[in-house]
Image (spheres, rainbow, N blue to C red):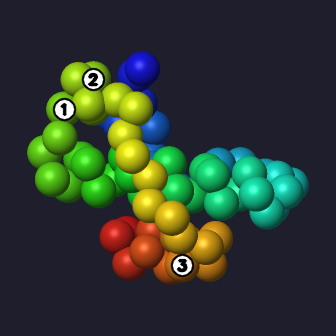
Amino acid sequence: MFYGIELVDYQQLPLNFDHYNRDNQRRIALRMLAALKAKREGVDLDKSAPLPVEALMLEDALAQLQSLS
């Protein structure tokens, strides 16, 4: 699975993020967080996919995303 870390800005929420229900917002935020942390740690995303995600609440995931930007 290709994450497109070079093509997608994982620090920016997707367009119309507020239109997704909370469960999907959480899934999106957790996947974004996993991709950003993996990139920061030098993980080869092509060889390590799918990346594990943390068990965080939506607000915590969004706060961590904010702190990484």
**Residue 36 placement (x, y as % from top left):** 34, 53
**What numbered label is drawn on residue 46?**
2
Against 69, residue 36 (above or below) is above
Residue holding disc 3: 60
Q: CA distance from mark 3 to mark 2?
A: 27 Å
Is label 2 in a helix, a strand or a loop? helix
Q: Is residue 67 left or right of residue 43?
A: right
Residue holding disc 1: 44
Labels 3 and 1 touching (C-beta < 8 A) = no
Badge 2 local density, few (<14 within 10 Å), some, or many (20+)? few
Q: Earlier in the sequence, mark 3 or mark 2?
A: 2
The residue that appears at 26% across and 48% down in the rendered structure is 38
Q: Earlier in the sequence, mark 3 or mark 1?
A: 1
**Residue 58 placement (x, y as % from top left):** 64, 71
Q: Amino acid at mark 3?
A: Asp
**Residue 4 placement (x, y as % from top left):** 40, 29
Is label 3 in a helix, a strand or a loop? helix
Residue 3 occupies quadrant:
top left
Is residue 17 visible in this depiction of the protein?
Answer: no
Q: Is residue 39 left or right of residue 8?
A: left
Q: Nearer the viewer, residue 26 or 10?
A: 26
